[in-house]
Image: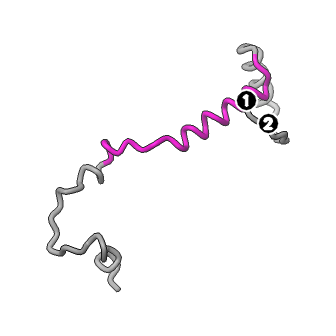
Amino acid sequence: MGNLHRTQIYIEEDQMRQLRFEAERERLAVSELIRRAIQRLLEAKTRSVDWNSDPLTKAIGKIKLAVTDASVKHDHYLYGK
């Protein structure tokens, strides 16, 4: 575990009761349970995109345009000026 930063948060009474119950059940400190929950949240937010299942990725190379400079002048073709 790296350097810890002390902070204070306010949580609902019911949430604290549930946290204490889970911490005791898992034989952890409430603070460790909270750190693990935060880590899972952050990992879920930063998960990499599965580009193979992205529909736009599948469209690459499938569309033929009349223009040859669309990658350079895409703003012009999408929005005008």
Q: Is 29 located above or below residue 50 in the figure?
A: above
The image shows residue 55 at horizontal and vertical percentages of 29, 49
Q: Which residue is mark 1?
A: 1
Quarter location, residue 38 = top right
Q: Is residue 56 magenta?
A: no
Element under disc 2: loop
Q: Quadrant of the C terminus?
A: bottom left
Q: Is 13 located above or below residue 42 in the figure?
A: above
Q: For the image shown, how many numbered marks are present on the structure?
A: 2
Q: Quadrant of the N terminus?
A: top right
Q: Amino acid at mark 2?
A: Leu
Q: Is 71 located above or below residue 26 in the figure?
A: below
Q: Is 29 located above or below residue 60 in the figure?
A: above
Q: Which mark is residue 4?
A: 2
Q: Are marks 2 and 1 in contact (CB under 8 Å)?
A: yes
- What's the residue at 83%, 42% (across, down)? 7
Please state the extent of the stretch shown in magenta in the rendering.
28-54
